Image (cartoon, rainbow, N blue to C red):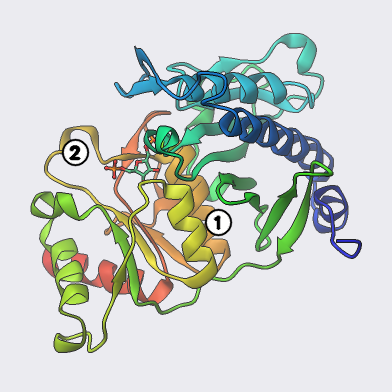
């Protein structure tokens, strides 16, 4: 541990661009909020916080007590850097305004899903926090200021509350992972320069939706299931945690693909996962680690958003597999 690089020291040497000071302060606040959320999750049942609230968020999903607690921790802790001009959260319908006294510098927008995979929280399975940072041209940002494509992100990351708490980050110069040392309360660099293997024999998808998928996705999964006896000539393994952060973390470590494709049940809402604070930050990380992220027909990072809570189909992970899925979609269109 004496040799390990702490997050603060890492930021000091790693951040070299014009956002250096702002990102150092904002990332430090985000990491602190994630530590607080980890503590709230750890003691959830002891504090009576594991259940549902009976209320619904903007997505029409039942809110868990920890969804709201995590959201409040994040909003409160990330006002202080002086650089955040406004925020967007999965749990709040409108733009979250930052008090004037906290906007000395402004200029940046913070978008986040405070507790991703929260349907897993009361069964003690890994959940996470996902965030994205955009530059703002307006110190009093309106909804329209947030509607920038994913390629405009200057930083993205997630915390994973798993068997250990981890913080994974990109500022457009590779992907680095940090592990929380519970004793010192510091994150240390444990996974430098994370790279997704280009090939894989593992896929993650909610198979119960099979009959609702479009033909190119059914074809891809059929071929995986046929394994050695089919066109692919090799056997595949499957995992489904129902916590995107956990699936993506596994993919960053040993490769694989994660699919939440369009299906006929989701058509009216555009997909399952949210573009601005789920698909975009995760796609930025995946691409920075040498992987790819698509809707099937479009690179996710190039989508021009129409709304802050917009949903999209998401397929991401090992590059050669995602290229194959894109090819199957293109063949179907002809
Ligand atoms: P959430 O942000 O409301 O938790 O929803 C997103 C989650 C993802 O983490 C996960 O991949 C997906 O929903 C699981 O969906 P399903 O319950 O259909 O398996
Ligand atoms: Mg989510």
Look at the picture and state if 143 lies above or below 255. above
Q: Is residue 119 left or right of residue 327?
A: right
Given residues 46 and 289, the one toward you in this image is 46
**What is the quadrant of the C terminus in the image?**
bottom left
Asked which quadrant contains residue 329, the reply is: bottom left
Q: Relative to residue 133, is residue 201 drawn left or right?
A: left
Q: CA distance from mark 2 to mark 1?
A: 25 Å
Q: Position of residue 314 (x, y in %)?
A: 33, 51
Relative to residue 102, is residue 58 drawn left or right?
Answer: left
Residue position for label 2: 266
Are there few (<14), some (14-19), or many (20+) residues within 10 Å of tag 1? many
CB under 8 Å between discs 2 and 1: no
**Residue placed most toward the observer, 76 or 123:** 123
Residue at 58 percent across and 40 percent down: it is 132
Secondary structure state at the residue bearing disc 2:
loop
Q: Position of residue 317 (x, y in %)?
A: 42, 65
Name the residue carrying label 1.
285
Q: Earlier in the sequence, mark 2 or mark 1?
A: 2
Q: Position of residue 280 (x, y in %)?
A: 47, 46
| Residue displayed at 37% across by 51% down | 241
* Residue at 22% across, 89% down: 233
Q: Is mark 1 within 8 Å of ligand 1?
A: no
Question: Which residue sits at x=50%, y=20%?
Answer: 49
Q: Residue furthest front?
A: 46
Where residue 2 appears, as percent x and y from the top left, is: 91, 61
Which quarter is ligand 1 in?
Answer: top left
Answer above or below: position of 183 versus 111. Answer: below
Q: Viewer-proximal residue, 267 or 104?
A: 267
């Amino acid at each position: 541990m004496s040799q390990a690089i702490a997050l603060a020291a890492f930021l000091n040497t790693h951040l070299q661009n014009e956002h250096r000071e702002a990102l150092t302060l904002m990332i430090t606040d985000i990491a602190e909020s994630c530590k607080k959320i980890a503590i709230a999750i750890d003691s959830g049942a002891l504090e009576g916080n594991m259940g549902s609230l009976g209320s619904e968020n903007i997505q029409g999903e039942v809110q868990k007590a920890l969804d709201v607690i995590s959201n409040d921790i994040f909003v409160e802790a990330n006002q202080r850097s002086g650089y955040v001009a406004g925020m967007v959260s999965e749990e709040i319908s409108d733009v979250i305004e930052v008090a004037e006294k906290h906007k000395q510098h402004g200029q940046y927008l913070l978008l986040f899903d405070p507790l991703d995979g929260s349907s897993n929280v009361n069964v003690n399975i890994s959940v996470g926090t996902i965030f994205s940072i955009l530059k703002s041209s307006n110190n009093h940002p309106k909804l329209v200021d947030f509607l920038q494509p994913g390629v405009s992100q200057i930083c993205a990351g997630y915390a994973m509350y798993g068997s250990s708490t981890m913080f994974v980050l990109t500022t457009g110069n590779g992907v680095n992972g940090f592990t929380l040392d519970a004793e010192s309360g510091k994150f240390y660099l444990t996974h430098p320069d994370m790279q997704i293997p280009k090939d894989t024999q593992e896929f993650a998808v909610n198979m119960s939706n099979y009959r609702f998928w479009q033909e190119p996705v059914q074809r891809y999964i059929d071929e995986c299931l046929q394994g050695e006896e089919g066109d692919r000539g090799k056997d595949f393994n499957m995992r489904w945690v129902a916590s995107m952060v956990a699936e993506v973390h596994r993919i960053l470590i040993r490769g694989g693909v994660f699919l939440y494709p369009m299906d006929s049940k989701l058509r009216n809402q555009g997909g399952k996962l949210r573009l601005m604070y789920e698909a975009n930050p995760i796609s930025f990380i995946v691409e920075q680690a040498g992987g790819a992220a698509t809707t099937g027909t479009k690179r996710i990072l190039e989508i021009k958003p129409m709304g802050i809570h917009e949903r999209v189909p998401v397929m991401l992970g090992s590059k050669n597999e995602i290229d194959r899925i894109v090819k199957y979609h293109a063949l179907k269109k002809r």
